[in-house]
Image: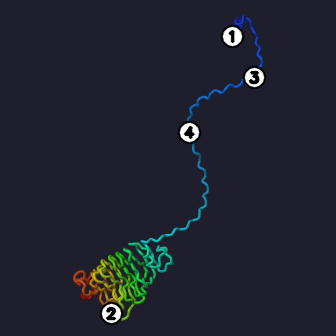
Amino acid sequence: MNNYEKAIQKIKSANNNQIYCYCLGPTGPTGPTGATGPTGATGATGTTGSIGPTGPTGATGPTGQTGPTGPSGSIEANPYNLYVQSTAAPGGDGSQLAPFQTIEQALAIAKPNGTINVLSGTYPITQQIVLNIPGITIKGMAGTEILLQAPVVPLLTNSDNITIEGLTMTSDNPYPVEFIQIGGNNNQILNNDIYGPDQSGDSSTWVVNRGFVTQGGVTNLLVRNNIFHTLRQPAYLNPNSTGTIMDNVVYNTRGFVVDQAMFVFSGNSWGIPENAVDIALLSGTITGAPYDPLSALEASNSDATISDQR
């Protein structure tokens, strides 16, 4: 007996050997959808995939136009290093590009221990220039000429550690003044050419013009590598002033005058026309060093002619 037959037999047994025939009618309408059940728990997040390779860099875009160039900045004057030129345009600030016209303008802003560079040109002087800034240097360049045009002392040092260097100093007439007057201590006169205009007759009759004069009591003045000529005297050294005068050339004068001062003379020489005397030691000047023995003083100064009036 196959499975189908077995199933019929079971039905007969269950229904007293009666077999009913059930015919299926058409399918009824679909019932309403039941309520949505609760959302299930979120599953675990999956792992992030690896980053893909970077794509190639795109082409560089065109360079934009260059903007206009701004104005050049100015170079400001340095009060420790100023410049002067007599032919400069008015309104300079003392810088190398825009120099002052006069030394006085530079002195108005110069700082202690600074330098005023006096560029080539002629500088007429009719009023005294007072150097009263400690440590200031007045430095002339080649072709710089200080031309005195009035009977005034053109340069007066009135402080310490001042240097006057590299100037040519002369005058339009023989005035009865010195070109430099030294006050203060530890000052220097270096590498200058100082001379007056020609005067006729014997030098004893000349107007008394001088290269420099010391005030009484100044100390430690150094006068070196200068040329003094065509003057009544290269210098007058007043009482109690001290210093060193060395390696200068002096001619056509009546010589250094020592008036109770104490200066070491060394390495000086005498040109042509010769001086009336080279060094004059006035009454009251000390005996002994640094002037005696006179033979040593003469020998150390190119066989100087010395007038000893002590």
**Mark number, residue 50:** 4
The residue to which callout 2 is attached is 204
Circles 4 and 3 in contact, beta carbons < 8 Å: no
Looking at the image, is mark 4 or mark 2 nearer the viewer?
2
Is 83 on the left or on the right of 201, as rendered?
right
**Mark number, residue 3:** 1
Q: How many other residues sit within 10 Å of disc 4, few (<14), some (14-19) or many (≥20)? A: few
Residue type at mark 4 is Ser
The residue to which callout 3 is attached is 29
Secondary structure type for disc 4: loop
On-image quarter of the N terminus: top right
Is 157 on the left or on the right of 12, as rendered?
left
Say which label, 1 or 2, has the lower sequence index.
1
Residue type at mark 1 is Asn
Say which label, 1 or 3, has the lower sequence index.
1
- Depth check: give the residue in front, 147 or 269: 147
Count up the numbered dots: 4
The image position of residue 294, as x and y in percent, is 23, 84
Looking at the image, is mark 1 or mark 2 nearer the viewer?
2
Q: CA distance from mark 4 to mark 2?
A: 112 Å
The image position of residue 291, as x and y in percent, is 24, 83
**Is residue 21 at all visible to an observer of this figure?**
yes
Q: CA distance from mark 4 to mark 3?
A: 53 Å
Q: CA distance from mark 2 to mark 3?
A: 156 Å
Q: CA distance from mark 1 to mark 2?
A: 171 Å
- Name the residue: 39% across, 81% down: 155
Circles 2 and 3 in contact, beta carbons < 8 Å: no
- Name the residue: 38% across, 94% down: 200
Say which label, 4 or 1, has the lower sequence index.
1
Q: How is the image coloured?
A: rainbow
On-image quarter of the C terminus: bottom left
